[in-house]
Amino acid sequence: MADTATTASAAAASPANASTDAPPFQLGKPRFQQTSFYGRFRHFLDIIDPRTLFVTERRLREAVQLLEDYKHGTLRPGVTNEQLWGAQKIKQAILHPDTNEKIFMPFRMSGYIPFGTPIVVGLLLPNQTLASTVFWQWLNQSHNACVNYANRNATKPSPASKFIQGYLGAVISAVSIAVGLNVLVQKANKFTPATRLLVQRFVPFPAVASANICNVVLMRYGELEEGIDVLDADGNLVGSSKIAARHALLETALTRVVLPMPILVLPPIVMSMLEKTALLQARPRLLLPVQSLVCLAAFGLALPLAISLFPQMSEIETSQLEPEIARATSSRTVVYNKGL
């Protein structure tokens, strides 16, 4: 966040508003209001925009430089609010807000859908063997672990050992639940083959949802031990709070339960209906491409809805935090980076 001096210098170089649709630019703040779900939804549509995956290194440097010029009041004439919002969108999609380092492309939120959809298709393949169940659950939790780690709150250092512990815990929990449920389904003699196949398609959801919670908690357990930074309204560091860390992990874990719900529940329902159509019965080779498109659509809908449940920069009343933090500021509320 910009401090008072920064705000003043930025105001001195206020951009020309050539686009009447663009609100006045505010450095470090979302373009859309975060107090409403719709505002957060529009904000995260920007964050997950896959077009930012194709931004060149040169374009990224230009975007960062433009924001630096705005910050220091040296903005060149003719720069519009739309250009500044576009530059900030690029920076937020590619660089971590705490470390300012580039996030590896498959682990960015903008890469979550393109790189995650093939995994979802694999999870929902019918007639899974034990080996294929283990493989797809391992691959899914490996991807999730890397996304969680890459988008964590990084105001405190996190040793590699914590990452390994969280990764192993998430993979073991996901594989155990998925394999256990598949075995139960196979032994359920009351199910007809068609019913058994349908039930098997729903097995990934409870496995993935429970493992996602385990993944988030284990991957970010260090935040609970060390706390995370909380900032006042001017962006000044107030202190490190374990209570804020608990709120951050709870909010993130809830999004990880909501996220796989439409992704792993809607496609089996849709596919069970589509498979009965004359087109797919006559052309079974179309089953996999159609399922891939259905999964892509479900993923594209689920991700922005899930991560919009809570703002990334969450607000909490200082009275709810540790006494030493409440005494360290006159602000009624403070903010913290929840992580994604």
Image: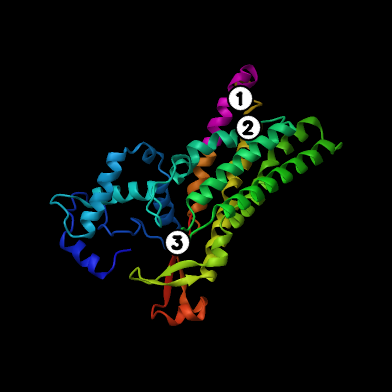
Residue 207: percent from left, percent from top: 68, 46
Asked whether residue 286 is in view, the answer is yes
Q: Secondary structure at mark 1?
A: helix
Q: Nearer the viewer, mark 2 or mark 3?
A: 3
Look at the picture and state if 14 lies above or below 209.
below
Q: Which label is found at residue 233?
A: none
Relative to 81, 166 lies left or right? right
**Residue located 42% across and 63% down the image:** 35
Q: Position of residue 146 (x, y in %)?
A: 53, 46
Determine the secondary structure under disc 3: loop
What type is the residue that disc 1 sits on? Leu
- Mark 3 residue type: Thr
Secondary structure under badge 2? helix
Check contact, mark 2 vs mark 1: CB within 8 A.
yes
Residue at 50% across, 81% down: 323
Tag 1 residue: 287
Q: Residues within 10 Å of mark 1 (few under 14, many from 20)?
A: some
- Looking at this view, is 1 or 237 the one in front? 237
The answer to which of 70 and 46 lies nearer the viewer is 70
Which residues are drawn in magenta?
280-296
Instruction: Say which residue appears at 47% left-offset and 52% top-offset.
Output: 151
Q: Identify whether 227 is placed above or below 136.
A: below
Q: Position of residue 242 (x, y in %)?
A: 54, 69
Determine which residue is flagged by label 2: 271
Crowding near the residue tagged with mark 2, few <14, some 14–19, many ≥20 C-alpha atoms within 10 Å:
some
**Residue 155: assigned label:** 3
Residue type marked 2: Met
Residue farthest toward the left in the current orientation of the protein: 77
Magenta region, mostly helix, strand or loop? helix
Mark 2 or mark 1: name the one nearer the start of the chain: 2
